[in-house]
Image: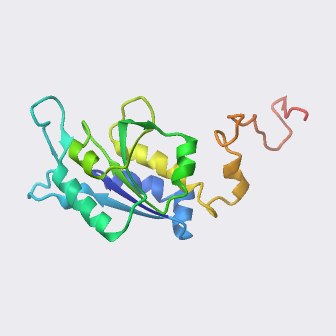
Amino acid sequence: MRVDCFTLFPEMFTGPFDSSIVKRAADAGLVEIAIHDIRTWTYDRHRTADDAPYGGGAGMVLKAEPLFSCLDKLLGERKYDEVIYLSPQGAKFTQKKANMLSLKKNLLFICGHYKGIDQRVIDKYVTKEISIGDYVITGGEAAAIVVIDSIVRLLPGVLGDSESALTDSFQVESGFDAPVYTRPAEIDGMKVPEV
């Protein structure tokens, strides 16, 4: 699987994608993740990627021009199964959506920031808007990390035990797993329950 992320803050991906399951999946060649800095596609010497909302109002909006430039280049290099914008207006992300996205070959994520991105980018390129919940976070980077992690762990060969992903919470009809225990059978007067 190939995953491209278009972001204003590429450094936010360094820790999460350079460790744990996602790193092992990348090292094994099961996923390729490319992070693209929106400022690379700006045209002025200050590398300005945002502007005030057209017509006024509070906050800032990511500009259309750098997004158009990068997206045109990336879409010219490969066909993406989905171009996903992470936004509060998106459909709520679920395990079922993670399962469906894990079957795709190429995914492109646009991480919004501030008040969002110019609507023309959404109208022209975006095939799916996803929200990870009804709350406000600083930008789409954290949401992208959550979504990508949940997808990558479902790829064949990523987890050491292939059955593990199939029995995770939200994969089974009963929902959450039962309580789990490790050895020793008793600690501090507390015993593992009888089966």
Q: Is residue 177 left or right of residue 96?
A: right
Viewer-closest of 8 and 89: 89
Q: Is residue 20 visible?
A: no
Viewer-closest of 126 and 162: 126
Please state the total of marks drawn on the protein image.
0
The quadrant where residue 79 appears: bottom left
Work out which quarter of the rendered image holds the C terminus and state it: top right
Look at the picture and state if 190 lies above or below 114. above
Point out residue 17 in the picture as x, y percentages from the top left corner: 46, 57
Point out residue 90 in the picture as x, y percentages from the top left corner: 39, 37
Point out residue 66 in the picture as x, y percentages from the top left corner: 19, 55
Q: Is residue 126 left or right of residue 52?
A: right
Q: Is residue 79 visible?
A: yes
Tell me what residue is drawn at x 52 percent, y 61 percent: 23
Point out residue 112 in the picture as x, y percentages from the top left corner: 30, 44
Q: Is residue 177 left or right of residue 61?
A: right
Tell me what residue is drawn at x 60 percent, y 54 percent: 154
Viewer-closest of 119 and 67: 119
The quadrant where residue 187 appears: top right
The colour style of the image is rainbow
Look at the picture and state if 130 lies above or below 4. above
Tell me what residue is drawn at x 56 percent, y 63 percent: 24
